[in-house]
Amino acid sequence: MSLLARCPVLPVVVLDDPAQALPLGEALLAGGVDVVEITLRTAAGLAGIRALSALPTLHVGAGSVLVPQHVDEVVDAGARFVVSPGLSASVLDRAAERDVPALPGVSGASDLMVAAERGLTEVKFFPANLLGGVAGIRALSAPFPAMSFLPSGGVKPENMADYLALPCVPAVSGSWMVDPGLLAAGRWDEVTARAADAVRRARAAGRRLIGPDRA
């Protein structure tokens, strides 16, 4: 199954404490989101991925994967996909060796040509807000009709429907659902509420949740 077709909303999480991981995962699942990206921006990221792998219905990925060593570390910790801010041939090669899907970040046609040469059909468009947003994706998608885009960077509840209106955008990613302040305060009910609201907005934009655990 396409990674981006699984759930139209991908929360991007920066953990300060591994103890936040399990209640966070449970809160997202309660809100109808079963995919999450735990970044390696903090020392707690790897331990958080390991903790979340205990939730079988949560599809856990790793973000900020910058070098091949990161691929090994996160896959060994239980990550089921990797996300990078840019396009690295060595990271893609290691991900292929470890048989894990990779979402490289792209910012223009040259990156997309490399991705297409490698047979990729899904990429992260980052930072979306600084690269023209919806208009940028629409322009780039014309010469790459087989490519699906995950916009990230500046995506908010107010504009996610604009992105999802594009046929080449099956999903969006962002951090508003999992704001570090909410995690630090243990406001798991608010995380659930924001996740549920994001799912509602995605459904209103015509996106279905078609992961294997969906009814």
Image (tube, helix red, strand yellow):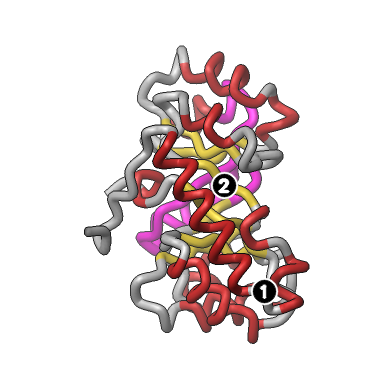
Q: What percent of the width, then of the height, locates residue 7? A: 40, 50
Query: Quadrant location of residue 185?
Result: bottom right
Residue at the farthest bottom position? 19
Q: Is residue 9 visible?
A: yes
Between disc 1 and disc 2, the foreground one is 1
Q: Residue at x 71, y 61 (%)?
A: 179
Rendered-image quadrant of the C terminus: bottom left
- For label 2, the residue is 173
Name which residue type carries label 1.
Arg
Vertical arrangement, residue 28 with respect to residue 106, above or below: below
Q: Is residue 117 visible?
A: no
Q: How many marks?
A: 2
Cβ–Cβ under 8 Å for marks 1 and 2: no
The answer to whether residue 181 is left or right of residue 138 is right
Vertical arrangement, residue 17 with respect to residue 180, above or below: below
Precedes in sequence: disc 1 or disc 2: 2
- For label 1, the residue is 187
Foreground residue among 35 and 159 = 159
Mark number, residue 83: none
Real-space Cα separation, disc 1 to disc 2, in angstroms? 21 Å
Q: Residue at x 54, y 75 (%)?
A: 49
Query: Which segment did they paint magenta?
Result: 84-111
Name which residue type carries label 2.
Ser
Vertical arrangement, residue 1 with respect to residue 43, above or below: above
Residue at the farthest left position? 215
Q: Residue at x 71, y 31 (%)?
A: 129
